Amino acid sequence: MNLVIVGSVAFDTIETPAGRRDRIPGGSGTYASVAASFFTRPGLVSVAGQDFPREILALLSARNIDLIGLKIKRGKTLAWHGLYATDPNQRTTLKTDLNVWQDFQPVVPEPYRRAEIVFLSNLDPESHDDILSQMKKVKLVAMDTIRYWIETNPEALFEAIQKVDILFANDEEARLLSSEFNLVRAGRKLQSSGPRLIIVKKGEHGAMVFGEKFVFSVVANPCDNVVDPTGAGDAFAGAFLGYLASRGEFNRREIKKAAVYGNLVASLAIEDFGLAGLLQASPSDLIKRYQDFKKIVSF
Amino acid sequence: MNLVIVGSVAFDTIETPAGRRDRIPGGSGTYASVAASFFTRPGLVSVAGQDFPREILALLSARNIDLIGLKIKRGKTLAWHGLYATDPNQRTTLKTDLNVWQDFQPVVPEPYRRAEIVFLSNLDPESHDDILSQMKKVKLVAMDTIRYWIETNPEALFEAIQKVDILFANDEEARLLSSEFNLVRAGRKLQSSGPRLIIVKKGEHGAMVFGEKFVFSVVANPCDNVVDPTGAGDAFAGAFLGYLASRGEFNRREIKKAAVYGNLVASLAIEDFGLAGLLQASPSDLIKRYQDFKKIVSF
């Protein structure tokens, strides 16, 4: 176990121009774990209610995700309902029922505590210290956040950001966090606030990585059929960190490749509703996609 | 003379978050010519009024642009006034005075008529046939358009598009022309309508090229100081075609490189008001930018 992912497990109701699905499995922790599992065996720290289907848990286990950190609690699973406009970068949350996620106090199980990489995915920033204090050998702390924490608890959020090595943010969040519209300025400003690495995810426009003395920019994999953008950002982060966990190196070369894999795994995620795009793809599908992508961007 | 550019010469009044400039030289033909002149000696077919400054004409000549196709007519030069929002991809035209551009009937001077590449830049689509009938050896016809023609004369525009080899469109235009929001679908649909090559310019998000059996996608050069986006698209097209004219080849490899150069010359244009960004840059600045860009996108 070299990568621990702390994030939500949820039921998602999703409306996109391609259709609607009710109460399908999702959650940032789930997406990130499935994405990471292309490269490594991640451990998921999360909570679900008793209504969460056993078959899905079996599917995740079969996918090489360690679930001893996933608590099944009396009550209902977190439920989210979102609506996407024609522009897949525009989404509206119609409803969130936190349910068992409400009072979740993440406990990192003993076998996970010597992992070197931990991903704090969209958590209450005030919970970070407690989680990190449970880790014994951590070398890389990564976090992602959501608009909700930027708006409701910016002080705690900025304090949390200072303590991480890697910050993932989408374009909107990067702008809000930095008060800069220009994403290059936003990325540099965020980097100067602490993290060694800022990854700005731009959805259909790809991603930018602001590292120590380098910038890396990558287009999204051209996709003519965006079915469901849910989880694309979580999949990006999970694949990015899963790839790094599998390599054991944290240099410029590996960071760039991690971003490309993040990009490509995210492109798998959006091609079907929910987790289906990721679960249908095999490692060899991903290798094929990597080779095709190389051709699309090389000159 | 291997590249003929037919497009406007204008005075631009520009307001951006970085400031305001009144009546500075611009126009799609001017931007495209200056951009092309990094690679070749283009000929400009256009019209200006007697108020257009001689020093600017001398500057363009010194920049290796042939101006025998530029008519100086009694009257005033085309004048445009535009306003950019914080998002540089959003612009509003406040005023356009067509002036001498109003009744412009492009005449291709004799020495230009054996050029192999011609660029029809934002022209009335009904004027294309007349211009092309003056060319004797043309191999590649490229065009760009503007929202105005899409809205006022779509029939003539679609007829014109069928006859060109290369269509440049920004993301908004590509969506309007194809009735597809997804740019990959938009590009493919436009390609099926005739042109061998569709180039979708996405401003700060780079560009996509839809070729015969290939797609190429490239990020914009990361820029933390967008001063004035005016002319970026014209500069892209001018550099793209100037590069191709200098190579004499029209294969996948050269098309990709042309798009990268289009991208990079556009990134020079936006760093200062009007033509200053382009005019200040030397060929060696561009080579340096190419090398730096390679590092930013390679993995």
Image (cartoon, coloured by chain):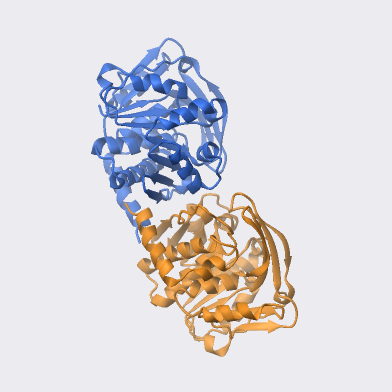
Chain colours: A blue, B orange
Is residue B23 at all visible to an observer of this figure? Answer: yes
- The number of discs equals 0
Residue B208, placed above or below residue B69: above
Q: Position of residue B37 (x, y in %)?
A: 49, 75
Residue A180, placed above or below residue B102: above
Residue appearing at x 54%, y 25% in the figure: A153
Q: Nearer the viewer, residue A250 or B203?
A: A250
Q: Residue furthest top?
A: A74
Is residue A296 at all visible to an observer of this figure? Answer: no
Q: Quadrant of the N terminus of chain A?
A: top left
Residue A286, placed above or below residue B240: above
Q: Quadrant of residue A132?
A: top left
Residue appearing at x 47%, y 72% in the figure: B241
Q: Quadrant of the C terminus of chain A?
A: bottom left
Judged left or right of residue A279, residue B62 is right
Residue appearing at x 47%, y 31% in the figure: A145
Q: Quadrant of residue A234?
A: top left
Q: Position of residue B73 (x, y in %)?
A: 71, 83
Q: Quadrant of residue B77?
A: bottom right
Q: Position of residue A247 (x, y in %)?
A: 24, 39
Q: Position of residue A166 (x, y in %)?
A: 38, 36
Judged left or right of residue A7, residue B71 is right
Q: Nearer the viewer, residue B58 or B229?
A: B58
Judged left or right of residue A24, residue B128 is right
Q: Nearer the viewer, residue A10 or B272?
A: B272
